[in-house]
Image (tube, rainbow, N blue to C red):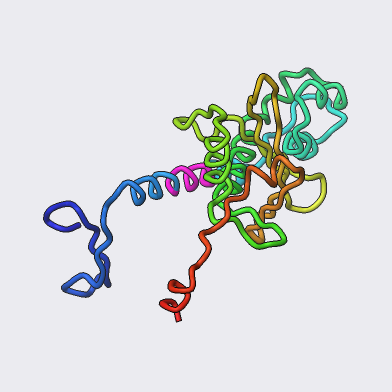
Amino acid sequence: MSDDGRNLLLGRRTAKTAAFKLPIDETLVEGLEAGHSLRESARRAAAHAELPPPVETTSSLLTVREIQSLLRQGKSASSIASKAGVAEEWVRRWEGPILWERDGAAARARSVPMGRARGKSSLPLGEAVVANLKRRKIPIDAEHPSEGWDAVKRARGNKWVVSFIFEARGHTTTARWEFDPDASIVVPLDRTAAALGWVAGRKKTARSRARSR
């Protein structure tokens, strides 16, 4: 960091002087905070995912792995308990780590720009949704950007269905996207998702195109 605390000094560790100066502004701070939040969500999800399932101590028609899979798909603890023939409390023992994993998937999806036939949005999904809601004068809790978001895993493969629920004009509305974490691709699954997830980039003028050549 510079002596006045206004810039980050970047360069090789072995170098005596910095190669670049990066101004410490609101955009940088917000980006670092968002990156830290995503990293923590991913770390918690990975930590829970790596834990071996505890030894079953009750008679269940479903294995622990099957219960966890159904929880990832968004099935309720009560419906899984009924299917497994066990008490609901037994199923909820495995619910916590799965909810962390679902939160992590939703957070990763929010950091990826939505794709459409015309290309990718100029903003990541989460920022695009906030921008479009504000433009439509729909209230949103800016202090809790994860509020209303969820993700459930498809029964087959590694893709997730990410959803965002919000109130607009007295009605509850849900937008859904498909998220492929392996390819870092987000695509809309309905018209609401397509509208909220897209922010067009600035069109280049003839002068700006000439400068970029």
Q: Could you say where residue 193 lies in the image, as x and y percent from the top left?
A: 69, 43
Quarter of the rendering containing residue 135: top right
Quadrant location of the N terminus in the rendered image: bottom left
**Position of 206 compared to 1: left or right?**
right
**Position of 93 compared to 111: left or right?**
right
**Position of 154 compared to 116: left or right?**
right
- Quick check: 148 above or below 114? above
Q: Could you say where residue 115 lies in the image, as x and y percent from the top left?
A: 66, 57
Question: Who is closer to the viewer here, 71 or 140?
Answer: 140
Residue at screen point 79% across, 20% down:
78
Question: Who is closer to the viewer here, 207 or 163?
Answer: 207
- Quick check: 70 above or below 181? above
Image label count: 0
Region of the chain picked out in magenta, as a range: 35-43
Residue at screen point 67% across, 26% down:
93
Q: Could you say where residue 151 lies in the image, as x and y percent from the top left?
A: 67, 39
- Quick check: 128 above or below 168? below
Question: Who is closer to the viewer here, 16 or 147?
Answer: 147
Quarter of the rendering containing residue 147: top right
Quadrant location of the C terminus in the rendered image: bottom left
